[in-house]
Image (cartoon, rainbow, N blue to C red):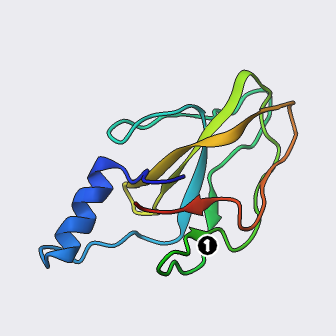
Amino acid sequence: MADNLTDAAEARVVNWLTGNTTTAPTLPLMVRLMTANGSDSTPGTEVTNAGGSAYAPQAATFSVASSGVPASNSADIVFTNMPAIGGSGIVGVEIWDSAATPFRWWWGAVTLAKTTNLGDPVRILAGTLVLTEQ
């Protein structure tokens, strides 16, 4: 996902850079699965539970980014007991923090949409959720 900071996150980064705030994400960062992607300014449509499923956002940790090397998830992210998702399937992910009122930091489309049957797991393998900024 290249250049997918939300508009609000971009403002927080600029305010941090200019010394106007010390606001940082409340950890852990939580990965949410989307059935419709949002945009820089609008959240997408998150997966909802049905039929006894137990989908929930999952915590993620990321490697350190450096010049020319993006950050990526440092361990598998596993969503268990998913609801049945047909149609276009899971088409994106969003990264929110864990504040009392969660803040949306990042969003992006997946490379390959994923449909699920009730009870299926969804796994994002370590190193495949890549965060870069251009």
Q: Position of residue 62 (x, y in %)?
A: 59, 73
| Extreme residue in the front direction | 68
Q: Nearer the viewer, residue 69 or 53?
A: 69
Residue 122, compared with residue 70, is above or below; it is above
Q: Nearer the viewer, residue 23 or 126?
A: 126
Residue of label 1: 61
Q: Is residue 87 left or right of residue 81?
A: left
Q: Is residue 44 left or right of residue 46?
A: left
Q: Position of residue 15 (x, y in %)?
A: 17, 68
Secondary structure beneath label 1: loop
Q: Position of residue 130 (x, y in %)?
A: 60, 61
Residue 126, compared with residue 57, is above or below; it is below
Q: Position of residue 131 (x, y in %)?
A: 53, 62
Image quarter of residue 70 = bottom right
**Label 1, residues with CA under 10 Å away: few <14, some 14-19, many ≥20:** some
- Residue at left 49%, top 54%? 2
